[in-house]
Amino acid sequence: MSRDLESLLRFAPDGSSDRLASLRREALAQFEEQGLPTRRLENWKGTSLVPLERLHFERVGPGAKSIEPETGAFDLVFVDGRLDSAASDLSALPAGIRVTTLLSALEEEPERVSDFLGRLAEPKRHALIALQTAFLEDGAFVSIDPGTKTVRPLRIRFVSTSDTDLDTEAEAASASFPRLLVVAGEDSAATIFQAHDSIGSAAGLTATVSEIFLARGAHVEFVQLQSEGAARVHFTSLHARVERDARFSSNVYTLGEGLVRSEAQVELAEPGARAELNGLFLGRGKGHVDHFTTVDHAAEDCESDEEYRGVLGDHSRGVFRGRVIVRPDAQRTDARQSNPNLLLSDHANIDTKPQLEIYADDVRASHGATIGQLDEDALFFLRARGIGESSARLLLTNAFAQSIVERIDDQGVRDLVREHVESTLDQFEGAARRDGERLR
């Protein structure tokens, strides 16, 4: 283990509930045994964590910065992994949904929370999950009563801060480790919007694990928007268990500029379970974005539909690994997977590998990936109608990206994500114009 990474381990927390303390100790031991993943591992061939190894950590948890409250903006706000009660607003939550901090839930109903916490995200199988669990201090716990159907989304914001706004190699790094645990009762329905952003430009690590349990007939739409700065390393791992006739819709939008590893693992555990995995990643600058997804068809008569789209510009690099497993008993499975990618620069590249592992014989499944550039005929068509080249390129790129955004059911969340995507793509085109001017 690198010397700089050892600077992080000295911050390992202690205390809290017996269950949490035990979970932390076990996870820390498992992380020290495994060490950081390297490219020698099959699941990490496309991504190096050397930038994380080089960080020298001087802080875990909140720094000096505070978040200004925004009326009606977010229900829960966590700053560097801890609740900011002044910036949070739970006054508008509907009946039948309970939202609290993970620490409060462990104190008030330890047996129930312990039945779910760490059950899907297993530290012994994944070093970064072990690291996140070892430093787990707090997070959000969401419990939705059976039959409850919410009319507005639950909004959770995770903010990572820097101690300085100066971007120099001598800066000390900060780390945050927020957690999300969601338990949706039978025939319930809810939309959960999880936003990640950062304040300041210094280097750091954000590591988040989300575990979502859907009981029979439940429907959860989960939307994750990540827009952290270029100097941060961002790791997020989403785990969902979907029971009989339940539906899980995951929508992941990665707009940050740094080193990103985003994982999603969905288990279709009982007959009739359905999952939709929608994703969009925008690579710019020298960013590296790695998406690794697994859909496990463990029961018969289940359906999954997955599409991740990549838009890569500048010198960015994208990685997509999509894995669909169909177990021997998972007859009458219907599984689809697609990864279309758009390269906006000669220097950008994508490494894509969709995979099917089928062990049943009554299965309908498809998978594929495409890599291309903007259609020259379409560009000519727009320019012939008086649209400038930059505007035409932006229009086509935006259409390619927004088709994934339109899959969000909740209109308010969809509009917010659309604005973020449009703003990021404007930066793409602005950078392209500046590069063109320098070349001329």
Image: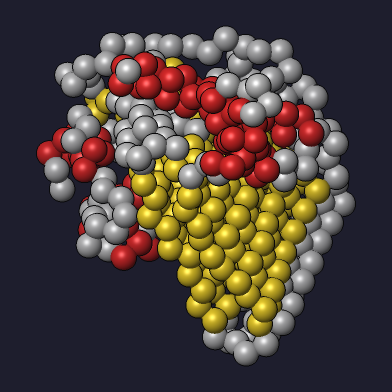
Of residue 283 and residue 108, the one placed in the foreground of this image is 283
Residue 413, image quadrant: top right
| Residue lying at the far left of the rendered structure | 3
In percent of the image, x 32 and y 27: which residue is there?
231
Residue 247 location (% of width, % of height): 74, 59
- Horizontal side of 209 relative to 90 (left or right) equals left
Q: Is residue 158 visible?
A: no
Residue 17 location (% of width, % of height): 47, 42
Of residue 274 and residue 114, the one placed in the foreground of this image is 274
In percent of the image, x 54 and y 41: which residue is there?
376
Residue 398 location (% of width, % of height): 61, 33
* Image quadrant containing the C terminus: top left
User: What coloring was used for the rendering?
Assistant: secondary structure
Residue 328 location (% of width, % of height): 58, 86
In percent of the image, x 27 and y 63: which residue is there?
41
Q: Is residue 125 visible?
A: yes
Of residue 254 and residue 57, the one placed in the foreground of this image is 254
Instruction: In the rendered view, tell whether residue 77 sits above or below residue 184.
Output: above
